[in-house]
Amino acid sequence: MEKKIAELKKNIEDELNDIKSGVALYELKTKYLLGKTSEIPALMKELGKADKDERPRLGQLINGLKDWASEVISKREAEIAKLERAERYKREAIDITMPSKKHEEGSLHPVTVVKNQLVEIFSGMGFKVLETREIEDDFHNFTALNTPKEHPARDKQDTFYINDEFMLRTHTSPGQIHAMTSIKPPFKVIIPGRVYRADDDATHSPMFHQMEGLAIDKNISLCDLQGMLDVLVKKMFSADVKTRFRPSFFPFTEPSVEVDVSCFECGGKGCKLCKGTGWIEILGGGIVNRKVIENCGLNPDEYTGFAFGFGLDRIAMLKFGINNIHILYDGDLNALKQFKD
Ligand code: PHE
């Protein structure tokens, strides 16, 4: 038995020297120390078989071995833990002088920037945002807007028809009909959204964006529209920008106006942006035609309103100095990135 004790001691010493990881050390501990069946406790059990006189001395020897093994193993445990920690620190070390990965930052599309600005300004004036459908029927896109089948104004709009009845909306004005037939007056709404026309050149894209505005109440006049627009353009462009109304025609407004703003680039002296005129056309509008109010089931003697509509793409182009509308839709990120708000 004494031989066996010396042998175990030697084995533990040898194996301990080769151990480099906490896992292997734990395995060694299980082999010799832990539980009832590992080597040292098993030896203790065998004590019963030894000579009665020898037992105390052998017992002491085995206990001595056990204490010694526990001590050397825990010492090694501490060493390995320290080593493993050092290795982990090395492995996980961050080189703060290393150049970072390029982090691409997205930006809002110029049309979204303009739309958000306008929504904020209009919200401040009590307008609610309404979004209506992009596929419209003849009634909403034309007829209810006082543009019956044979009306010459239909020729101006190159419509993408889906069938005889349905089409991609050519403007956001059908939203006026949805508003008047679903909201109880008085109300003020803006209707932003995509519109479609078969038209394609440097300043026209088959899909573009408009924002419609509609206020319905009692005794609304053109002055209300003018006052509201004055505030709007000052907030949108700059405080010294003025508006100018010119008579125009739309089947769904009477009277109708075309609205210009004084050129925010040259202050009205005349430049490339305003083509030397000092004014830039931005919007169509007018007093909602009695017939349209009637078509929506409201009494035109009781309710009046103003309506207006403008192109968001055009405003974005003016604001960001973009001269070709296709820059907005070609998806060239390098081009679009320049127009951060
Ligand atoms: N819908 C008209 C257009 O697309 C603009 C407009 C809207 C005019 C509302 C008057 C009133 O040109």
Image (cartoon, helix red, strand yellow):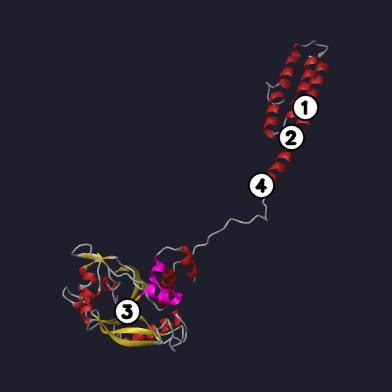
Per the model, the C-alpha gap separating discs 2 and 3 is: 81 Å
Give residue 77's mark: 2
Amino acid type, callout 2: Glu
User: Is mark 4 in CB contact (under 8 Å) with mark 2?
Assistant: no
Crowding at dot 1, Cα within 10 Å, few <14 / some 14-19 / many 20+, comes out as many
Disc 3 residue type?
Answer: Phe
Out of 292 and 316, give the one closest to the viewer.
Answer: 316
Question: Mark 3 vs mark 1: which is more N-terminal?
Answer: 1
- Distance from disc 3 to disc 4, alpha carbons, whole Å, reads 62 Å
Residue at the left extreme, as displayed: 150
Task: Find residue 30 and report its horizontal and vertical position in percent.
Answer: 68, 26
Circle 4 sits on which residue?
A: 92
Q: Give, as a three-letter code, the residue at label 4.
A: Glu
Q: Is residue 335 left or right of residue 13?
A: left
Q: Of discs 4 and 1, which sits in the foreground?
A: 4
Q: Nearer the viewer, residue 312 or 6?
A: 312
Left/right of residue 158 with respect to residue 90 in the rendered view:
left
Please state the horizontal and vertical placement of residue 322, each as a whole percent of the image: 43, 73
Q: What whole-number distance in Å separates the C-alpha atoms at marks 2 and 1?
A: 12 Å
**Magenta residue span:** 311-329
**How far is disc 3 from disc 1 in space, using C-alphas?**
92 Å
Q: Position of residue 130 (x, y in %)?
A: 34, 70
Q: Quadrant of residue 299?
A: bottom left
